[in-house]
């Protein structure tokens, strides 16, 4: 089982852009307690963002996910979300995501600067870092955690504004369950197997027809060869009779 160990947050929501705030997670359970506005939901949002790359709902395309530069009394705020976890095999992994929110003359500009995945070899201790420019980190992290992105988004780190999806209308509920249980992928796989079976069956029928046609041609060729031999024998006999 994957284990989340530590989360660093800087410049996210009400977390200061000047200093990193560290949250350590303990086994078997970690309770997050605080008054309203203390940042409990922000921790869940940061965990979800680190694992899936998704921004929280209704964050105005990231504008309200980063501390407002006006509040920080700056023209630009740089933010960080950094998560350390261990895979089921015990391999340490660190995912770092960097953001920037800039106050322009008339509007805010949000940028996702970079995302880096750092892994370490347990035996040798050798570290390997890969940027999102070289790999699809949003897919790699859930795969390394052994949990699908749909489960991370809709179950483990579901946002409080989206937590009522089990009470949603039938179509929304079906789509959610399809994502969580990968039902769509299963259906597509079954359909692909069905099509492949039909194609192979058609190919087998065509091969049998070709084999039957080849057999008939062979029999015809043997019959013609036999007739030719008989004709040659008759011709030879006729020549001997004339002589």
Image: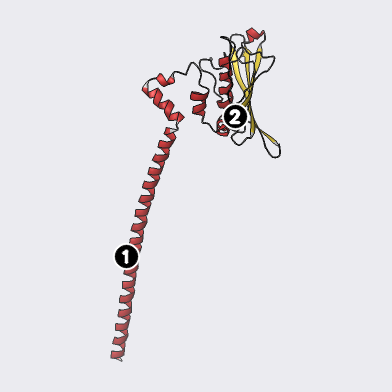
Q: Is residue 159 left or right of residue 210?
A: right
Front residue of 101/237: it is: 101
Helix, strand or loop at mark 2 = strand
Q: Is residue 197 left or right of residue 20?
A: left
Residue at coordinates 60% horizontally, 15% vertically from top-left?
Answer: 109
Q: Earlier in the sequence, mark 2 or mark 1?
A: 2
| Quarter of the image where one finds residue 184 | top left
Residue at coordinates 45% horizontally, 31% vertically from top-left?
Answer: 181
Q: Is residue 18 left or right of residue 162?
A: right
Residue 216, disc: 1
Position of the N terminus by quadrant? top right
Residue at coordinates 38% horizontally, 43% vertically from top-left?
Answer: 195
Disc 2 designates what residue? Answer: 3
- Category of crowding for the residue at label 2, using alpha-carbon neighbours closer than 10 angstroms: few (below 14), some (14–19), many (at least 20): some
Q: Going by the picture, which residue comes out furthest to the bottom?
A: 243
- Category of crowding for the residue at label 1, using alpha-carbon neighbours closer than 10 angstroms: few (below 14), some (14–19), many (at least 20): few
Which is in the foreground here, disc 2 or disc 1? 2
Answer above or below: position of 231 versus 70.
Answer: below
| Quarter of the image where one finds residue 227 | bottom left
C-alpha distance separating marks 2 and 1: 68 Å
Answer above or below: position of 151 versus 42.
Answer: below
Circles 2 and 1 in contact, beta carbons < 8 Å: no
Give the x, y percent position of residue 24.
64, 22
| Quarter of the image where one finds residue 239 | bottom left
Q: How is the image coloured?
A: secondary structure
Q: Going by the picture, which residue comes out furthest to the front?
A: 28
Answer above or below: position of 20 versus 194.
Answer: above
Front residue of 124/197: it is: 124
Front residue of 178/70: it is: 178
Position of the C terminus by quadrant? bottom left
The mark total stands at 2
């Amino acid at each position: 089982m994957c284990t989340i160990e530590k989360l660093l947050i800087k410049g996210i929501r009400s977390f200061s852009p000047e200093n990193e705030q560290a949250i350590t997670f303990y086994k078997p359970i970690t309770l997050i307690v605080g008054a309203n506005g203390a940042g409990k939901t922000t921790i869940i949002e940061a965990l979800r963002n680190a694992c899936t790359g998704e921004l929280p709902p209704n964050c105005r395309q990231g504008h309200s996910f980063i501390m407002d530069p006006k509040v920080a009394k700056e023209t630009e705020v740089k933010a960080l979300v950094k998560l350390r976890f261990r895979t089921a095999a015990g391999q340490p992994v660190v995912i770092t995501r960097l953001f920037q929110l800039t106050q322009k003359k008339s509007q805010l500009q949000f940028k996702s600067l970079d995302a880096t995945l750092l892994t370490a070899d347990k035996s040798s201790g050798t570290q390997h870092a890969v940027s999102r420019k070289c790999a699809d980190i949003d897919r790699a992290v859930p795969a390394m955690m052994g949990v699908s992105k749909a489960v991370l988004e809709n179950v483990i780190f579901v946002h409080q504004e989206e937590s009522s999806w089990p009470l949603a209308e039938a179509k929304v509920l079906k789509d959610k369950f399809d994502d969580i249980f990968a039902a769509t992928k299963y259906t597509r796989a079954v359909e692909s197997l069905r099509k492949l079976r039909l194609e192979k069956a058609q190919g087998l029928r065509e091969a049998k027809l070709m084999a039957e046609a080849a057999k008939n041609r062979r029999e015809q060729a043997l019959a013609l060869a036999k007739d030719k031999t008989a004709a040659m024998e008759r011709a030879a006999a006729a020549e001997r009779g004339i002589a």
